[in-house]
Image (cartoon, rainbow, N blue to C red):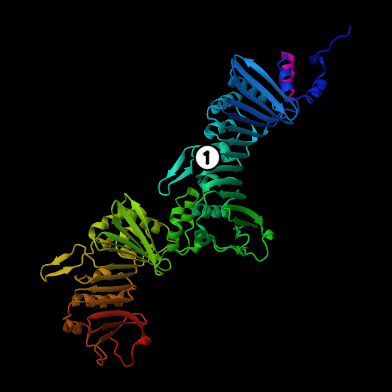
């Protein structure tokens, strides 16, 4: 009588060889035969077990598809009093019924077994396709049981809860993420009526941060490019991309150590070609009208690679690094930075100040590397119910702010009569003025401005300007009009004060108004500045408030002869005074007292009166001129510049 040898009694090598010739489902059935066989299979998973897994839900059907090594699909669907599980590959089709069990429970059990007996510690890919929302709960439940799944690539199709799925996948092994038909809640951009893809939860996860490649299909959404800048390779299909994001991406490619390729396909039509050319310049290669593709090549600082930017008529943008030897002959390689080509007016047209709001990285880049031609002269004015900011960058540009019903309008124009405007609803014109002034002052490129002028033709708005200066902090400028404490005393070289309306002191004896500089003259900005210009036609001034400057210009109502004499004596001893001009608007009627002190003027052949005084221990001479218009001019000159035969007084 022949004895029957059981499979479990075969040597391990023989059993393993047998299992290599069985399909995955047959092995899983054998595993259920007895404890010893189940233990052997668990300890020695056959080489043919799966390395790719795809989980799908559709209507009331759930399926698992995997390669082992041939494609195999297991489907689960409900029937009366139970469910049916069917499996098929390229050659066979089998099915099995389960009574008094739901198709969800059977699916969960089989998925758990498949994941437990995958041969590779790290799958090639794992895909979750949810074509009905209910199945996501069951998939999440089984992933919770399994624990952590290791896979090189993870794909989501139609999944609304990606942030809940991602944590179940090992972030150390996950290299690629693919997301298709993403329907998470969008962020509404009220200004442009767009739906922006909301990745706020996902981008905080280690799986998102550590992955190197991502493919994203979200054709009904706009995306925020900053969510993808840490990857090496990116491919995005989206509704729209802004010119700000294109500029941001180019600048990030120039500085990033990781970005190697970035593809963007726009489905809603890219309509900012003019702004694109203004930002990137003309294409590096001549455009073929028969096949209109535009290509730019840009040098990457301190790198042998070159950035290649491609754009075609199908609104496909392709950014990639290439070797410089792969640049076609005759192609122009752009070396200057995008931002450095823009003046302040172009900044507003191209929305550079809006670009810095896109993300932290671009804001930091613009703040640390302000474009070189940004403004060096600023004038802030208020008049009636309007305010304006005028600056040179390098052309004159005026930005005006005025109220309208339910908001305000900001308009800007330059010397070429280019005019644009933008409305702001539910914002006052002074609030918008203050905000824009703050941005301009923060992003001027020079360490010290040439000039800063504050013109307040309506006194009530001085508080708003002061408030904005308080926010700005310390302004560096060579010449300023008002609000001294907010300006850097180390850089401040010149001060101009026009139409000064500070509280004056009354000289009861002579019934004159004296300019009150008591608070100002205590400030470091006043004491450290080298030049001053004061136009106060309705006031007299005290000469001693100005004797520490190098160059002084004063237009005033009147000045006593004692101050003129004091000024002359100070010039003979001061190491700093070089020129001092005084225009007196009231008639100077103290010439006799002046002659008694200075002596008679020299050179009576013209209407101007002149004196020359020797400066002790110095090769220079003090020249004093009094014109018929009652203007005094004090200045140091070289001895050789004194007219011959002229008396120089001691």
Q: Secondary structure at mark 1?
A: helix
Can residue 473 be seen here? The reply is no
Crowding around mark 1 (Cα neighbors within 10 Å: few <14, some 14 to 19, many 20+) is: some
Residue at 58% over, 53% down: 314
Residue sticking out furthest to the left:
509
In the orientation shown, which residue stands out farthest toward the top? Answer: 1
123 in relation to 254, above or below: above
The residue depicted at 45 percent of the width and 42 percent of the height is 187
- Residue 235 placement (x, y as % from top left): 59, 46
Q: Quadrant of residue 445?
A: bottom left
Please tell me whether residue 599 is drawn above or below residue 204 in the rendered image. Answer: below
Taking the image as shown, residue 344 lies to the left or right of residue 296, namely left
Give percent across and percent down for residue 394: 43, 68
490 to the left or right of 612: right
Main secondary structure found in the magenta portion: helix
Q: Between residues 639 and 464, which one lies in front from this camera angle?
A: 464
Q: Which residue is mark 1?
A: 203
Quarter of image, res 287: bottom right
Viewer-proximal residue, 522 or 402? 402
Observer-nearest residue: 1 or 365?
Answer: 1
As for residue 35 lying within the magenta part, the answer is yes
């Amino acid at each position: 009588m022949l004895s029957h040898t059981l499979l479990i009694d075969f040597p391990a090598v023989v059993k393993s060889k047998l299992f290599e010739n069985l399909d995955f489902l047959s092995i899983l059935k054998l595993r259920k035969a007895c404890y010893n066989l189940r233990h052997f299979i668990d300890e020695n998973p056959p080489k043919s077990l799966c390395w790719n897994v795809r989980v799908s839900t559709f209507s009331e059907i759930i399926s698992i598809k995997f390669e082992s090594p041939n494609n195999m699909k297991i489907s689960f669907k409900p029937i009366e009093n139970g469910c049916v599980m069917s499996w098929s590959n390229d050659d066979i089709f089998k099915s099995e019924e389960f009574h008094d069990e739901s198709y969800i429970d059977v699916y969960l059990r089989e998925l758990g077994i498949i994941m437990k007996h995958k041969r590779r510690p790290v799958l090639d890919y794992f895909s979750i396709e949810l074509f009905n929302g209910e199945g996501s709960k069951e998939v999440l439940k089984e992933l919770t049981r399994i624990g952590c799944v290791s896979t090189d690539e993870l794909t989501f199709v139609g999944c609304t809860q990606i942030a809940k799925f991602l944590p179940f996948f090992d972030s150390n092994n996950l290299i690629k993420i693919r997301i298709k038909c993403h329907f998470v809640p969008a962020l509404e951009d009220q200004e442009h009526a767009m739906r922006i893809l909301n990745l706020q939860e996902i981008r905080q996860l280690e799986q998102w941060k550590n992955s190197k490649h991502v493919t994203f299909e979200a054709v009904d959404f706009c995306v925020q490019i900053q969510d993808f800048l840490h990857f090496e390779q990116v491919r995005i299909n989206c509704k729209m991309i802004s010119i700000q994001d294109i500029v941001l991406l180019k600048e990030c490619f120039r500085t990033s150590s990781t970005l190697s390729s970035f593809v963007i396909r726009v489905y809603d039509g890219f309509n900012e070609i003019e702004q694109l050319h203004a930002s990137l310049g003309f294409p590096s290669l001549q455009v073929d009208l028969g096949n209109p593709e535009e290509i730019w090549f840009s040098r990457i600082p301190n790198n042998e690679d070159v950035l290649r930017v491609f754009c075609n008529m199908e609104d496909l943008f392709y950014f990639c690094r290439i070797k410089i030897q792969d640049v076609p002959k005759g192609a122009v390689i752009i070396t200057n930075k995008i931002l450095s080509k823009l003046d302040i007016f172009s900044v507003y047209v191209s929305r550079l100040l809006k670009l810095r709001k896109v993300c932290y990285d671009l804001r930091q880049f613009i703040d640390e590397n302000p474009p070189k031609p940004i403004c060096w002269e600023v004038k802030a004015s208020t008049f009636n119910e309007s305010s304006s900011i005028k600056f040179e960058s390098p052309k004159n540009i005026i930005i005006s702010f005025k109220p309208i019903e339910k908001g305000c309008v900001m308009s800007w124009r330059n010397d070429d009569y280019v005019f644009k405007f933008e409305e702001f609803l539910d914002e006052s014109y002074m609030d918008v003025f203050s905000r824009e002034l703050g941005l301009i002052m923060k992003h001027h490129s020079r360490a010290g401005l040439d000039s800063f002028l504050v013109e307040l033709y309506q006194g009530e708005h001085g508080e708003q300007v002061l408030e904005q200066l308080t926010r700005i902090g310390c302004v560096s400028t060579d010449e300023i009009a008002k609000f001294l404490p907010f300006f850097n005393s180390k850089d401040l070289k010149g001060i101009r004060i026009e139409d000064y309306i500070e509280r004056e002191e009354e000289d009861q004896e002579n019934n004159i108004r004296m300019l009150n500089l008591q608070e100002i003259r205590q400030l470091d900005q006043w004491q450290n500045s080298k030049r001053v210009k004061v136009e106060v036609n309705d006031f007299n001034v005290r000469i001693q408030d100005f004797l520490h400057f190098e160059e002084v210009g004063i237009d005033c109502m009147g000045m006593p002869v004692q101050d003129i004499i004091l000024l002359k004596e100070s010039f003979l001893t001061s190491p700093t005074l070089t020129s001092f001009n005084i225009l007196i608007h009231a008639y100077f009627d103290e010439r006799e007292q002046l002659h008694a002190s200075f002596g008679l003027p020299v050179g009576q052949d013209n209407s101007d009166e002149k004196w020359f005084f020797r400066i002790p221990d110095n090769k220079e001479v003090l020249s004093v001129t009094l014109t018929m218009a009652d203007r005094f001019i004090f200045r140091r000159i070289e001895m050789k510049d004194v007219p011959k035969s002229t008396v120089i007084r001691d």
